[in-house]
Amino acid sequence: MENAIAEIKTEEEEIQPIAEDEFKFPLEPRFYDFFYITKAGLEENAVAKTMETVRNSILEQKGIIIGEKSPQNSRLAYKINKVSEGGRGWFKFMIKPEEIAGLKKCLEKIEEITRFSLSKIPKESTKIPKKRMLRKPTPTDDKRMEKKEEVKEEELNKKLEEILG
């Protein structure tokens, strides 16, 4: 037993402490949603400039844009700065969590944006919905349609008279 204890002590002596800087693991990029409301009545070039500013802010912070929607003017649920209309738009992007603070500071400086929400989202919700396509009728659908019997108008009127009296 004394030999086993001596061996453990020698192994402990060989282990050197790791500096705190070396212990940090790089964080994986996460998915975020940036929803924003612009001032009402902005012209198209002002809207395009605002979107370009947001896009550049995300890219400067080493983010990857997944999807975006330009602001559409609509009536707001409640007034913001005594205004009841504004343009709603969003960006979905991927960025490292340590870059979010810098991005938030950049986004707060954009004057055309009255309110915004920056939130972390699960990966599943990053998919942009596609337009739903109608299904083409199949041969079985045609057979179902053929089985329906045609009812003559006279028979229908007689049945209604019997029911209504």
Image (spheres, rainbow, N blue to C red):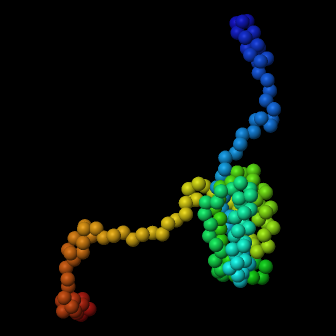
Q: Quadrant of residue 115?
A: bottom right
Which image quadrant for residue 144? Answer: bottom left
Residue extending farthest to the top is 2
Q: How many marks?
A: 0
Q: Position of residue 123 (x, y in %)?
A: 59, 54
Query: Which residue sits at x=79%, y=79%?
Result: 81
Question: Which residue occupies 72% across, 51% down?
Answer: 97
Position above or below: 158 against 34 = below
Q: Quadrant location of residue 155?
A: bottom left
Q: Is 16 above or below relative to 98?
A: above
Q: Is residue 125 left or right of residue 158?
A: right
Horizontal side, residue 158 vs residue 85: left or right: left
Q: Is residue 88 shown left or right of residue 145? A: right
Residue 94: image location, x then y, percent: 65, 55
Q: Is residue 39 above or below residue 97?
A: below
Does residue 165 appear to the left or right of 40 in the view shown?
A: left
State the quadrant of the C terminus: bottom left
Is residue 112 visible in this depiction of the protein? yes
Residue nearest the viewer, comparing 67 with 11: 67
Residue at image position (77%, 61%) is 104
Q: Estimate the x, y position of residue 65 in percent, counting from the top left.
A: 64, 60
Q: Position of residue 1 (x, y in %)?
A: 70, 6
Instruction: Tell me if residue 117 can be seen.
Output: no
**Image height check: is 28 above or below 100?**
above
Along the viewing direction, whichever of 99 and 50 lies nearer the viewer: 50
- Please name the residue shown 79% across and 29% down the image: 18
